């Protein structure tokens, strides 16, 4: 076991939690990510392997599925696989083992930072952040959206629970933008 | 102070009294008042001075079309000029001031302009201030600006916050009058997603201004009850205080919500205004209509206003401009104002109706076939002079005059895609044409349906039609359904100083003059006279100007044309467009994995794109940046230094065709690169100019990690996707950015291997034999953490780049510093990085500057002729391969104390110094601690053959003239022994 | 503007990056006899129609698909949107 200590994307040793009125923004560092892109003419096999890995049918365009290992659609024949960091720090290797030569796999764990937004009025916050029609998003929907010029993914767990993935190096700006919108909207 | 002109009834809250200030005097108002209604209630008619002639002015309207009642609100850094008193809500403590007057509103020194009005006619500035040109900036413009100012700025930063937001709906209803409310009820009850926006703080539109009833309710009660029902529907969002400012492409509307203009102090974090981008499937424009004035001599005195505005002030705000008023009208609606005012106890001096067949009324005098020919009253109306039907004159005493010239549908937003309104003879007005913005329909008065019943019905039908609803429409209450009775009448014959555009001070005489001078197109008329070009876009003036122009030309109004409107509907503060994108929040900031550590070390940071990078790390006692940078260079070259190079773009390239793909995007070959090796690659644009450079490390047969320069990371990734998807769609290659995923540090210097051996786990042999120059591979560090190691060197020293997952980057940097203590390890920043790469003669952004080719960079032979790559064909063009093409060289001052600067040009040792004799230019320069003098990289004509030549380095701008020697660009270790050590 | 993405449905044009004429897909053969002229035309010559135009847009803020958008440059009406990859294949491009 190596002896280097991790810091969160916001630079702390513990994840940051901010609450404004009834909405909470939580930094979520304990997630491992790996991208999977099917190789040419291997699309069906790659999907099959991925389905086996996440235990449910590979999510369609704009959707996510699976537990505890899940995946969301990121592009044509491309998915991002998510899993708990504790148990899946080497997720990229695990995914590569599962898909073999049918897909290209790239570790993405620390390319992203995740903030979970929870609360009854979370939609009021989201409408200040991005052009997505979040009111129409249902459980299991995943969409790309620009928040403060940052290319993010927005995942809907329920009408009052969303996850936002943004580029890790801009975690501070993204966090500032989200909490500013919370103060403005709530 | 008592509110002398406060009437009974109205929609203001009399249970509560607010105090406010206007021009440093205290007044009182009630919640629900606008600044204009409150001032009128306090018997204040004079509100401002006009733009050009400084004529005393009051309010003309009761809405956002107001040209005259323009004031400054608030004080200090919240001061806002050019705000319409007719829409500003009064709140406790509001501080407002008149503008465009000096020293005071009642005595304005520049009112002298009015006496010279014969000279200040249309085109005055064009004719007068033509020459000499130099006088414009120094003399004319400052004088004109001072005289013609519309309010003043605080010159301080605006402390308020502004937001942007995004909303979606099936149907956006613009305007919450009778048509809009009925439309919302129809669509809302049917379950559609509806947004109902209105610029007013009270929804209801004219229903709040009228005395008639809707069914069993008063009009305003019906409006309130409907709003209550709508606000209970979860699928309907009501947006009062929200102006829809523009109709943009594909159903996108812009809207400004004034969330904080009506409160004395905003809670922390709350925005003053929000700019909404509303995505709609359909939009229904229910913007109503605007009454138009009639022009007559001296028609701009305070107290002269639109008759419908007078009715709004009486019925909604319970106030009147004067206790004795007259009405001047060409239609029946003007009479309604007289009836309503009389019912509130205001005396009616007379209704002056231009029509011989005007209706009679037994409660007040109606002067049929009469016209107002002049008015009196220096700071406010006192008398009007009327020409009666029999030709005799009569003077009426009154403090206010309501003018009604008919109604213009508010077609503004229908024009935003260049739609042209069409003429309607019945209304004598323009109505929306057929070429509306796609998805927009128009209902109610905006569409020319002026009766209340008609508006209600067309709102319901409009919503149902727009959404394709099949359900039954809501019941439309009984309401006023009067036919339009009017005789078009634009101006009183013989008048000259009769104002059309009160905001820009354009008179009937100006329009006639412009016609005489040959300005026959409406667009020319506008620009010559400035009619309709003020902040109100001529909402109350364009029609009058057009009618007079038509008459002069002997044509009909539609033959003469119309001007169209453009966004925004009403003025929007720049701050609202800016939103939160200002200062630190102008763009996102990217932090490197070692940022927090570098901050602790006291690093000085520099912005590189969005990144913040450590520029140098000053030590206590170092007073000049050069001290720190020179030390960092010397220490790195002497032992070992560490630099965070995470910011370089990293793209993961995988697939069975990965190598073939790189062969396409790089001009040099990659197919034969062995696994475990890295190669420098140069990327060209299709026109043969260098685009970017970097390295590609082959981690497996079908897996490369490519680096790009920091600045070009996004562009290169985009370009590679273009090549993959658009040019070679069947290549089996997959791309994804991993820039952020890995913390990557350059470890450079003769002791770099020794330092890394303390970190890299012992099972990985990184000796020179096992891990030679340009080697690469997956390793583990610090007891098992996955990492990548590349033996590449930008500094020219024995060097490595080591990468770990970003979350461990902070810890790895601290470990490198701790374990490097025995080697006197030094962290270095971007300045030392730059100095060392110049010393080594490595090209960077300054050299890959969008004008240079591989040949210029000394890498002409790298462009493989054996394969097709982007840019290879066009790089062979003759013009890019002239014998005296620029080549990269090094330069050194002959006198070691001289400085060389980037941007300076090279000239022959003797001869003229001019552009024709230019030999090249310096792209990068630095003080080299290794050579103990300044050095530079330059592009020099035929530079490859000119080593040893002495030249002059000149910069005529800074009077620099230094003797330099042309040398190899590789100042340090030209044989490359160090990096292979 | 709103671009109807063939996979993702209507998306705000602010998510896209514009490149230009879709003729950039028709990259000439480097070994053809007239390669120099053909590349010159390819790199520099473009139509500038007032009307229907085939153009390349990149969904940078989305799924990173290159699209061929058929757009009327006068009215901004978008009549067709295809994945550039499909267009390229249909035009015979491969490896």
Image (spheres, coloured by chain):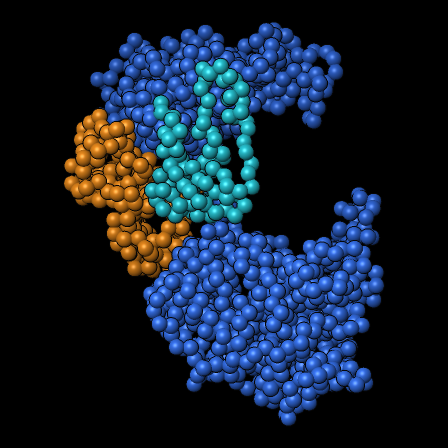
Chain colours: A orange, B blue, C cyan
Q: Is residue C63 above or below residue B42?
A: above
Q: Residue at x 71, y 83 (%)?
A: B356
Residue A173 appears in the figure = no
Q: Is residue C32 left or right of residue B374?
A: left
Q: Is residue B383 above or below residue A65?
A: below
Q: Position of residue B599 (x, y in %)?
A: 42, 36
Q: Position of residue A51 (x, y in %)?
A: 18, 38
Q: Nearer the viewer, residue B465 or B6?
A: B465
Number of numbered discs on residues: 0
Q: Nearer the viewer, residue B752 or B278?
A: B278
Q: Quadrant of the C terminus of chain C?
A: top left
Q: Residue at x 59, y 16 (%)?
A: B879
Residue A138 appears in the figure = yes
Q: Position of residue A146 (x, y in %)?
A: 40, 45
Q: Residue at x 78, y 69 (%)?
A: B497
Q: Is residue B721 above or below residue B928?
A: below
Q: Is residue B513 left or right of residue B560?
A: right
Q: Is residue B215 above or below residue B183?
A: below
The answer to which image quadrant residue B742 occupies is: top left
Q: Residue at x 35, y 63 (%)?
A: B192
């Amino acid at each position: 076991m190596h002896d280097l200590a991790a810091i969160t994307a916001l630079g702390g040793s513990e994840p940051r939690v901010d609450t404004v009125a009834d909405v909470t923004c939580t930094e979520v560092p304990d997630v491992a990510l790996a991208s999977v892109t099917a190789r040419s003419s291997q699309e069906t096999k790659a999907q099959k392997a991925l389905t086996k890995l996440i235990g449910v049918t590979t999510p369609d365009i704009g959707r996510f599925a699976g537990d505890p290992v899940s995946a969301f659609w990121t592009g044509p024949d491309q998915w991002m696989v998510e899993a708990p960091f504790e148990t899946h720090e080497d997720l990229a290797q695990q995914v590569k083992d599962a898909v073999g030569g049918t897909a290209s796999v790239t570790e993405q764990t620390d390319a992203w930072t995740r903030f979970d937004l929870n609360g009854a009025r979370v939609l009021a916050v989201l409408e200040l952040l991005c052009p997505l029609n979040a009111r129409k998003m249902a459980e299991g929907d995943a969409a790309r959206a620009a928040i403060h010029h940052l290319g993010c993914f927005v995942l809907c767990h329920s009408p009052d629970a969303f996850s936002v993935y943004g580029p890790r190096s801009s975690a501070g700006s993204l966090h500032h933008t989200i909490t500013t919108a919370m103060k403005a909207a709530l | 102070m008592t509110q002398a002109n406060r009437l009974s009834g109205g929609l203001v809250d009399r249970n509560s009294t607010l105090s406010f200030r206007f021009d440093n005097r205290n007044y009182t108002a009630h919640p629900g008042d606008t600044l204009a209604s409150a001032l009128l209630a306090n018997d204040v008619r004079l509100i401002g001075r006009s733009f050009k002639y400084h004529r005393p002015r009051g309010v003309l309207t009761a809405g956002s079309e107001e040209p005259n009642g323009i004031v400054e609100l608030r004080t200090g850094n919240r001061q806002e000029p050019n705000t319409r008193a007719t829409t500003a809500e009064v709140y406790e403590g509001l501080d407002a001031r008149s503008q465009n007057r000096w020293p005071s509103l009642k005595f304005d020194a520049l009112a002298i302009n009015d006496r010279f009005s014969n000279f200040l006619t249309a085109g005055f500035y064009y004719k007068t201030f033509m020459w000499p040109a130099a006088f414009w900036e120094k003399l004319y413009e400052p004088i004109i600006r001072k005289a013609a100012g519309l309010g003043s700025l605080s010159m301080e930063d605006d402390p308020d916050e502004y937001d942007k937001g995004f909303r979606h709906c099936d149907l956006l209803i613009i305007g919450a009058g009778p048509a809009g409310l009925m439309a919302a009820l129809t669509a809302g009850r049917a379950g559609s997603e509806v947004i109902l926006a209105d610029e007013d703080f009270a929804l209801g539109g004219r229903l709040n201004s009228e005395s008639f009833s809707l069914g069993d309710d008063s009009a305003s009660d019906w409006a309130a009850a409907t709003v209550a029902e709508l606000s209970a529907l979860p699928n309907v969002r009501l947006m009062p205080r929200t102006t829809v400012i523009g109709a943009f492409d594909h159903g996108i509307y812009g809207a400004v919500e004034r969330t904080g203009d009506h409160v004395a102090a905003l809670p922390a974090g709350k925005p003053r205004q929000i700019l909404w981008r509303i995505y709609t499937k359909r939009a229904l424009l229910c913007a109503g209509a605007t009454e138009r004035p009639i022009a007559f001599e001296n028609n701009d005195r305070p107290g002269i206003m639109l008759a419908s505005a007078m009715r709004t002030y009486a019925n909604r705000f319970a106030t009147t401009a004067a206790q004795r008023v007259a009405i001047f009208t060409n239609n029946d609606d003007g009479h309604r104002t007289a009836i309503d005012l009389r019912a509130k106890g205001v005396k009616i001096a007379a209704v002056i109706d231009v029509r011989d067949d005007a209706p009679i009324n037994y409660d007040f005098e109606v002067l049929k076939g009469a016209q107002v020919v002049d008015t009196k009253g220096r700071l406010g109306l006192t008398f009007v002079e009327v020409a009666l039907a029999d030709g005799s004159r009569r003077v009426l005493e009154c403090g206010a005059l309501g003018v009604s010239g008919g109604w213009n549908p508010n077609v503004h937003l229908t024009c935003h895609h260049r739609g042209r309104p069409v003429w309607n003879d019945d209304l004598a007005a323009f109505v929306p044409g057929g070429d509306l913005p796609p998805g927009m329909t128009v209902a109610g008065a905006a569409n020319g349906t002026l009766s209340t019943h008609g508006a209600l019905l067309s709102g319901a039908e409009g919503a149902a039609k727009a959404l394709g609803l099949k359900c039954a429409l809501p019941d439309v209450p009984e309401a006023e359904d009067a036919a339009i009775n009017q005789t078009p009448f634009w101006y009183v014959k013989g008048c000259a100083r009769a104002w059309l555009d009160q905001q820009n001070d354009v008179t009937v005489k100006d329009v006639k003059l412009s016609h005489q001078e040959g300005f026959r197109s409406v667009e020319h008329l506008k620009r010559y006279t400035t009619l309709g070009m003020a902040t109100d876009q001529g909402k109350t003036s364009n029609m009058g100007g057009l009618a007079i122009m038509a008459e002069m030309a002997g044509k009909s109004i539609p033959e003469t044309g119309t001007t169209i409107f453009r966004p925004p509907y009403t003025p929007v503060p720049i701050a609202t467009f800016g939103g939160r994108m200002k200062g630190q929040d102008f763009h996102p900031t990217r932090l490197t994995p070692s940022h927090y550590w570098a901050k602790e070390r006291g690093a000085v940071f520099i912005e590189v794109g969005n990144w913040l990078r450590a520029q140098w790390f000053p030590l206590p006692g170092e007073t000049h940046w050069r001290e720190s940078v020179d030390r960092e260079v010397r220490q790195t070259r002497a032992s070992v230094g560490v630099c965070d190079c995470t910011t370089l773009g990293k793209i993961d390239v995988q697939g069975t065709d990965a190598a073939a793909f790189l062969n396409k995007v790089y001009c040099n070959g990659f197919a034969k690169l062995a696994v475990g090796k890295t190669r420098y690659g140069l990327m060209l644009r299709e026109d043969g100019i260098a685009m970017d450079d970097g390295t590609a490390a082959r981690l497996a047969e079908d897996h490369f990690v490519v680096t790009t320069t920091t600045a070009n990371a996004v562009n290169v990734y985009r370009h590679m996707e273009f090549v993959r998807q658009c040019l070679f769609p069947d290549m089996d290659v997959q791309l994804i950015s991993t820039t952020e995923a890995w913390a990557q540090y350059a470890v450079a210097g003769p002791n770099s291997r020794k330092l890394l051996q303390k970190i890299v786990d012992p099972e990985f042999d990184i000796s020179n034999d096992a891990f030679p120059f340009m080697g690469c591979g997956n390793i583990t560090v610090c007891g098992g953490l996955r990492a990548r190691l590349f033996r590449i060197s930008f500094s020219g020293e024995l060097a490595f780049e080591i990468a770990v997952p970003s979350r461990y980057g902070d810890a790895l940097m601290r470990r490198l510093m701790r374990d490097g203590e025995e080697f006197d390890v030094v962290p270095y920043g971007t300045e030392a990085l730059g100095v060392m790469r110049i010393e080594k003669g490595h090209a960077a952004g300054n050299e890959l500057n969008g004008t240079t080719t591989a040949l210029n960079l000394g890498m002409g032979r790298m462009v493989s002729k054996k394969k097709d790559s982007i840019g290879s064909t066009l790089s062979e063009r003759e013009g890019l391969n002239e014998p005296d093409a620029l080549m990269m060289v090094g330069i050194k001052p002959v006198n070691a104390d001289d400085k060389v600067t980037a941007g300076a040009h090279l000239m022959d040792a003797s001869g003229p110094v001019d552009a024709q004799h230019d030999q090249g230019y310096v792209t990068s320069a630095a003080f080299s601690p290794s050579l103990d003098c300044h050095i530079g990289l330059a592009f020099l004509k035929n530079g490859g053959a000119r080593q040893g030549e002495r030249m002059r380095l000149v910069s005529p701008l800074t009077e620099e003239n230094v003797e330099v020697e042309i040398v190899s660009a590789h100042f340090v270790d030209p044989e490359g022994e160090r990096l292979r050590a | 503007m709103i671009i109807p993405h063939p996979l993702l449905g209507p998306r705000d044009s602010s998510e896209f990056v514009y490149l230009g004429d879709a003729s950039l897909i028709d990259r000439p053969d480097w070994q053809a006899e007239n390669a120099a002229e053909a590349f010159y035309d390819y790199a520099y010559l473009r139509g500038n129609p007032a009307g229907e135009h085939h153009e390349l847009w990149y969904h940078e803020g989305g799924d990173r698909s290159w699209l061929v958008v058929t757009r009327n440059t006068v009215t901004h009406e978008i009549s067709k949107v295809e994945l550039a990859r499909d267009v390229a294949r249909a035009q015979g491009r491969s490896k």
